[in-house]
Image (spheres, helix red, strand yellow):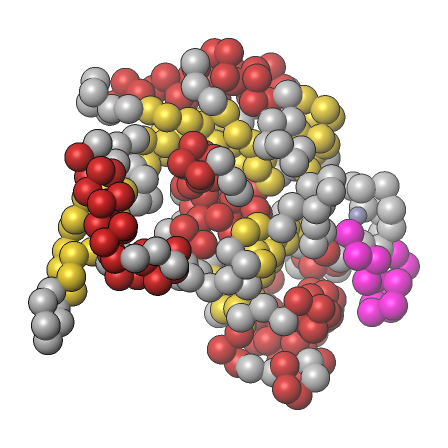
Amino acid sequence: MTRSDIASSLQLSKGRVSVITGQLMSQGIIEEYAYVPSSRRPSSLLRLHPKYASFIGISLHNREASAVVIDPNGTVLAKTFFERGDDYETSIRRMSEAVTTLKNECPEETNFAAVGVALPAYVSMDKQVCITSSVLGWDNRDVSTAISKEVGLPVFVENDTNALAVYESMFGGMRNIPAFVVIAVGDGIGVAYTIDGSVHHGEYGGAGELAHLPVARSLTEEAPRPCRCGNKGCLETVSSSQAIRARAKEVGLPPNIHLISTKAREGDPEALRILHTAANSLGYAAASLIQILDPRHIIIAIEDDLLHGVFTAALRQFIEQNLMPSFNRPERLQFTCYDTLVWAIGAAGLASRKHLFRSH
Ligand SMILES: [Zn+2]
């Protein structure tokens, strides 16, 4: 942004902004990096100085965990991958080792400021504690203190889908978009929503948890199935990749998303039924969320094999047919398959926000 942009958004005089930005530049916190042509005189674009600080992000979203180092503008400087481990102690040790590996890969003068960790979990409001995670089997674990003790840096934890929303709002296509929703469909279903530029957390870290809406009881003909949360018939038991694979296996289809999608494209009635049921249930939840929140965009993150076939077509159709006409704007819906590093980059982004602005 330019000095004029800063002046108008903070309602300060241009003179005052020039003094402040001059001080920040002399301290090496910000820099001019490009010029905007103008009929009068060109203005400089300002950004955080890439060498001011570096942030580490770790993601346990997948079994193959990942960790990155980014500069304050989201450029990835180093990355590493590791197995997340089967128990809490092993995971903490491996995350701490990943931090050491990344530090060794960066130049000695790198100023590491903080670490962010994305977990498939509910986390505490202060971003320190994993309240509960059915995927990891952790309850009330102070992940922040455990890693911080090993690596000597402040550590902040975040729900993995919330970390994805942080990635989008800081470095992705949702920069400057105040209200958007992310629904991430994998072996589980995660939802995050951003209002006025901040990810809404909820009192116990579970805001927008659509995965456990009991949709199967009203939207499918089959008996509700047990969910890992302890209830029955949740959205996750119908629409997650794991649920799709399990149903395919039951009817003699290969439990493989790529092959199920191919079978559906070829007209196999069972493959079509499974994908339509999954898409319609997810569509019901997504349409409800759009009508409740009225976001500018809703990003549905799904694996590549579901992105260009029957599942996505049915999902889009169901959402569009079930929205109130004035809410039905095709540009709202975005379907995407993310690179595996985005969760870790989002976690690093959270660490940078916490370090720079003491906010989320
Ligand atoms: Zn559930």
Nearer the observer, 218 or 244: 218
At 53% from the left and 30% from the top, the residue drawn is 156
At 44% from the left and 28% from the top, the residue drawn is 115
Q: Is residue 6 above or below residue 148?
A: below
Q: Is residue 348 above or below residue 331?
A: above
Q: Is residue 220 above or below residue 327?
A: above
Side (left or right) of 225 relative to 102 = right
Q: Which residues are magenta?
A: 211-224
Q: Quadrant of residue 125?
A: top right
Give the percent coordinates (x, y) of residue 232: 87, 50
The single residue placed furthest to the bottom in the displayed view is 325
Give the percent coordinates (x, y) of residue 122: 68, 38
Does the image show residue 290?
A: yes
Nearer the observer, 223 or 113: 113
Nearer the observer, 325 or 179: 179
Side (left or right) of 200 relative to 335 = right
Q: Is residue 106 magenta?
A: no
Nearer the observer, 356 or 18: 18
Give the percent coordinates (x, y) of residue 119: 58, 35
At 39% from the left and 55% from the top, the residue drawn is 10
Side (left or right) of 257 relative to 291 = left
Q: Is residue 217 magenta?
A: yes
Q: Quadrant of the N terminus?
A: bottom left
The single residue placed furthest to the top in the displayed view is 149
